[in-house]
Image (cartoon, rainbow, N blue to C red):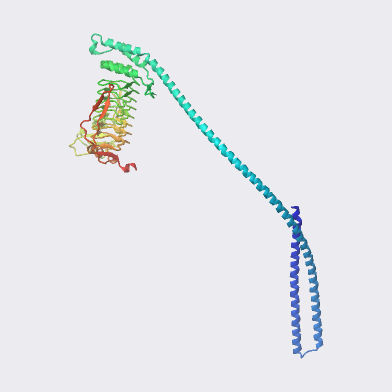
Amino acid sequence: MGARRPYTNWKKKFQKSTEELAALQNEKENLILKINSQESKLDLLKNQISNEADDNEKKPIKIFEILLGIASLIVAIVVGIYISKQTDIMNEQSKIYKQQTILLKNQEDLIKEQNGLFLQQNLMFDLQNNLLGNQNSKFDLQNQLFELQNELVGIQNDKTEQQNQLLNSQNNLFANQNKRIDQQTNLQEADRRSSIVYLFSNVLDKIDDELKKPGNEKTRVLSTELISRIASLTQALKPYKYLRNDELLEKAVSPERGQLLSALMNFKLDSITYLQIFEKANFQNSELFNTVLADVDLNGINLANSEIINSNISNTNFANSNLENVVFDGSYMPNTTFNNCSFQGAKLRDVNAINSKYIRCYLFDVDFSGAFLQNSIFNSEIKWAYEFGEVTKGKFVSKKVDNLKITKKVEDFAMILFGEASYIISNNNESTSLYHSAFIKIENEFIKDEKGKIEMVGGFSDYSSRMTKVLFNKANLSNVKISNFNLLNSDFTESILIDTDFSNVIVNETYFDKAKINPKAFTDNFQTSSLPFNIGGFYELIEEKKTGVTDQNYSDNSSQVISFEIGNMNPYSHYLELKKRYNE
């Protein structure tokens, strides 16, 4: 910056001199214009004098000469002034030229200095290029190091993956070890349970001794003391987990309780004795695998959480029994009757249960998938259709019935409860009147019977009238009668509904997708206008079929194959499916 200041000062002086020269030039031009103006005036004056001379007949030449001398004097004065000014301008211009020469010399010096700086800059560029070359070499080396590092990271990842595999293997070994320890623990428990086998044998011997007593061979009655010992034994035979197909069972069961129950039923004891045993004994979580419990009476038994798999329980009666979460999968159980039993969470998948009966049973979250239930009966025996006289036992919320015609014969009518909108239908075939939409709401009314027990009238007495979350997927329900139930959240997908009878049933959120049905059953149950069972607006018959029902095979505990045929079965001719608009 210090080297550039003289140049800047000279540049300013040069600009100032240039401005002064321009000003002098303008002044010169102005003087020339003035001289030209004076010459013009002189010529005009000459012309005027000439004209006046002509007009005045050429006045004396003396006057002309005087005037001419005056004009020449004036011209000489002006020329002298102009020459003086011009001389001054030339002198000032010479000074400016000298200053310009000095500035040009300074400029040359600055250009030389600039060239020297350019040379230094080029040297710096060469040095920078060398440094960039070195930097690129370093980058190449760095990239090579990165590649080497990536290879090392890849090797490390491989080692880590191998380590993870070894850890997984170790974890699997730990899991297997823990599994084996768990199995060993449960097997130790099983061994401990087996240590009471002698007690089991002793009780059975005592039963045999009592039955051989004189007079008891026919009555088959056990003493109260022995019944108590049996009950104590069932408490001792607690459920546990054991290995089945080299896998530990998820649910604890007691095979010994199942064996004891099977042995007790084979003794053919008195029915009162069985009631007393089932009242005191604990048969929950029993395991009956490939067991025969045919032609027996299990009134009052509690088999909750038990497994009765692939067993023969045909012609067996269950009454007032707790069958919650019992697994009956694959069992052969035709002609079996369940009366007032709780089936909550039970599994009856792929069972053969033709001609079976489910009377007043609590059916919640029950799975009948793939079951054969031909000619079976599901009846809650809770009247959804009350006789008109019985309805009056309840409390009428509103007695206003605008469209209910007074009749002399009360027995001609029945009322179906369906929320707040109840329906009066005719029971008399001869009656020409059919009344719908009799808007009467019946509230439950509780009264006490003669023994002081509270009884509900006018409504539904218990949950046995509900069939909730029951699965009949792919179940054969030909000729099955389902009466007096409120179907809630149940599923009949792909079930066979040949001549199935839904009598006095209310359907809520229950599906019949792709169910097989004959036209008569469809007309009777899905297309009639009788209320409240009328879901024909959602379903229709499509895709004609002509396929019969195939036979099935089952085996009992003796591995004997039991074949059976389903008689009196008409081939179904249609599918029952949802309409497209129902899916929208």
Q: Quadrant of the C terminus?
A: top left
Residue 435 visible in the snapshot: no
Against 550, residue 139 (above or below) is below
Position of 522 with respect to 3 (left or right) is left
**Up-down relation of residue 94 to residue 477 (above or below):** below
Q: How many marks?
A: 0
**175 with respect to 281 (left or right):** right
Q: Quadrant of residue 53?
A: bottom right
Residue 131's place in the image compared with 35, above or below, is: above
* Viewer-nearest residue: 219 or 350: 350
Asked where in the image residue 368 lies, by quadrant, the reply is: top left
Q: Position of residue 212 (x, y in %)?
A: 25, 10
Residue 158 image point, x, y percent: 51, 33
Picture coordinates of residue 485, whole percent (x, y):
28, 31
Q: Look at 71% across and 51% down and name the residue there.
A: 120
Give the x, y percent position of residue 414. 23, 34
